[in-house]
Image: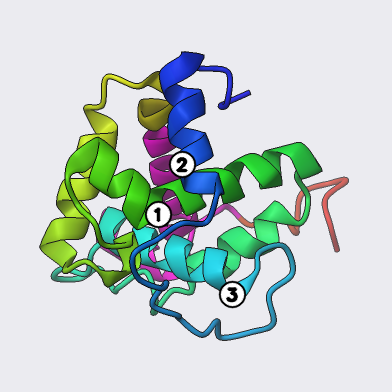
Amino acid sequence: MVIRYGLGGAVALAAGGVGLSLQRTRPRAPSRPLRALDERTFSILAAVADRVTPPREGFPAASELQVAEKIDELLTGVHPAVLEEITQVLHLLENGLAGLVLDGRPKPFTALSPQAQDEALQSWKRSRLGLRRTAYKALRGLCAAAYYASPEIYPAVGYPGPPDFGNVAGGPR
């Protein structure tokens, strides 16, 4: 369980969980109805996905590929405790009070500039708190997996796509 990372992690999670923030979450509307996340959590996840997989030559933005929507769909199949932990981690990342105490940034993650969001994620990656390092790896992994699993990315990475087993004995017809 992500939450079991000592007193520092518990304090950080408590600060994020109380909902105290100096500004509100910048909302992002999903392209389809949400199934696992609420709008606030989706907005935070979408901002993280944009920073984990920023657009560049030949690679579309995470928002164009609906990465956060794909993760929302994936989360419908996880244990409720896993969904709760991911929600708590996203709320902690977003929380301005926790950001102020841990990193000196009083703004919610979604209210930061792209460069400041990158810096916030890097502070989680390099944190002395195991909770933040583990959470960073989990969020980055989720976003990167959903992004690179998108068929629109296959040509950019030289992947021809999954094989077609339709004509193999015993395969789908």
Figure check: 72 above or below 124: below
State left or right for residue 149 relative to residue 163. left
Q: Are marks 2 and 3 in contact (CB under 8 Å)?
A: no
The residue tagged with tag 2: helix, strand or loop?
helix
Left or right, 151 with reference to 128: right
Name the image colouring: rainbow
| Point 55% across, 53% down: residue | 162
Q: Residue at x 68, y 74 (%)?
A: 34
Q: Is residue 59 left or right of residue 78?
A: left
Q: How far across and how far down the image is residue 84, in percent?
A: 68, 45
Separation of marks 2 and 3 at Cα, in angstroms: 21 Å
Residue 95: give its label: 1
- Furthest residue in direction top, as rendered: 6
Q: Is residue 158 visible?
A: no
Query: Which of disc 2 and disc 1 is earlier in sequence?
Result: 2
Disc 1 vs disc 2: Cβ atoms closer than 8 Å?
A: yes
Q: Is residue 126 above or below residue 112?
A: above
> Callout 1 environment at 10 Å: few (<14), some (14 to 19), or many (20+)?
many
Amino acid bearing label 1: Asn
Give the CA distance from mark 1 to mark 3.
Answer: 15 Å
Q: Amino acid at mark 2?
A: Ala
Identify the residue at image location x=45%, y=47%: 92
In the depicted view, which residue is nearer to us: 140 or 41?
Answer: 41
* Residue located beneath label 2 in the image: 15
Q: Which residues are magenta?
A: 135-163
| Disc nearest the viewer among 1 and 2 | 2
* Depth order, front residue of 154/94: 94
Q: Is residue 36 left or right of residue 45?
A: right
